[in-house]
Image (spheres, rainbow, N blue to C red):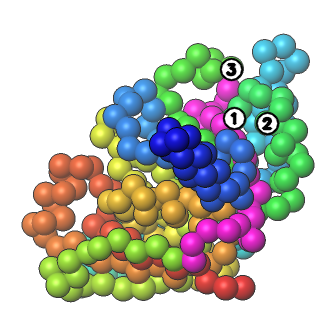
Amino acid sequence: MFFKSATALSLVLLMTSVQAQEDLPPNFPELRLSVNPLYHSVGLKLGHVLGVSRQRMVFRTFEGELMLGFGTGPERVVDRQCAQTVLGRQTGTLRSRQQDQPELRERAANKCTLFINPWPFSFLSRALRDTIEEIKDNPTAIYYVNYYIAPSHLLMKTKNQVLGAFPVQPDLKIEPSFRVSSWQALHPEAGVITGRVVQASLEYPVRKTYEIIIQERENANNFRAMSVNNGDMFRYINRAMLTGKLLRIEFIRLHRPHSRFLSALFNYMTNYRIISVEILPD
């Protein structure tokens, strides 16, 4: 009798788990920390697919472009907060402010570039091509991996290999918010921004870190990079991206030498850590 009850309870828990996840599309990735040295980056990018074309009749590949964000255009996208910080350090003299400003701005832009719009991608699957063609008129989350070396690189034009594509689902049933604990008393510099996460990825060669790119406000060419140090928070952000909705994002900024130590130990790309995300209503 005990074993029957245990089996029934297991089935109920399994069904509850499936129901909780049934709104997510099939094969939606659940990204976790990895020490796989074969790839540099893996994650999701959110934007609008500009088009996909077939290359070659034999050994075919499919090549496409994604315009990251909403209401953006083709250009180099720079983290403005980073660029302002770099410029502030470099413009230390009257001469640099007056005569060398274009050069300093270019140097800051090079240091703080996040990505180039549109983002090129490649893949080999005809079924994936058909999926993208069906959904490309809608904002789309692209699941990708960037391998250092792979046999497919002999055929594809880019190393940005697409593994899946998912149209946004504004009615996706997930928790409206998620928060992780933080010792804010130790990090008095904090803030809140509103925007969409347009990239959520694991970065770096060996010990990967969770990295985020946010498009501030509704339609603006204003992007910021932040980091996440909690896997559950990162996976919640992945699902929140799929809604295509604006998010209220609360963050803290680590202070030196604490941030310098963590960056050296874990390779975080920024000193900012996301501690709370709330999906805003339409």
Foreground residue among 55 and 253: 253
Foreground residue among 72 and 16: 16
Residue 122 lies in quadrant: top right
Q: Amino acid at mark 3?
A: Leu
Mark 1 or mark 3, which is nearer the start of the sequence?
1
Residue 240: % across, % down: 59, 67
The answer to if 168 sits in the magenta stretch is yes
Task: Give the labeled residue for mark 3.
Answer: 155
Q: Amino acid at mark 1?
A: Ser
Badge 3 crowding class, 10 Å Cα cut-off, few under 14, some 14 to 19, many 20 or more, is some
State left or right for residue 160 relative to residue 111.
right
Task: Give the labeled residue for mark 2.
Answer: 128
Task: Give the labeled residue for mark 1.
Answer: 122
Label 3, label 2: how far apart the Cα atoms are: 17 Å
Numbered tag placed on residue 48 in the rendering:
none
Residue positioned most to the left: 257
Mark 2 or mark 1, which is nearer the start of the sequence?
1
Label 2: which secondary element: helix
* Residue 184 vertical position relative to residue 209 in the rendered view, above or below: below
Label 1: which secondary element: strand
The answer to if 198 sits in the magenta stretch is no
Residue drawn 89% across and 49% down? 134
Residue drawn 26% across and 75% down? 182
Residue 195 lies in quadrant: bottom right
Query: Is the stretch drawn in magenta largely helix, strand or loop?
Result: loop
Label 3, label 1: how far apart the Cα atoms are: 9 Å
Magenta segment: 156-176
State left or right for residue 21 relative to residue 265.
right
Residue 261 seen by the camera = yes
Residue drawn 68% across and 68% down? 173
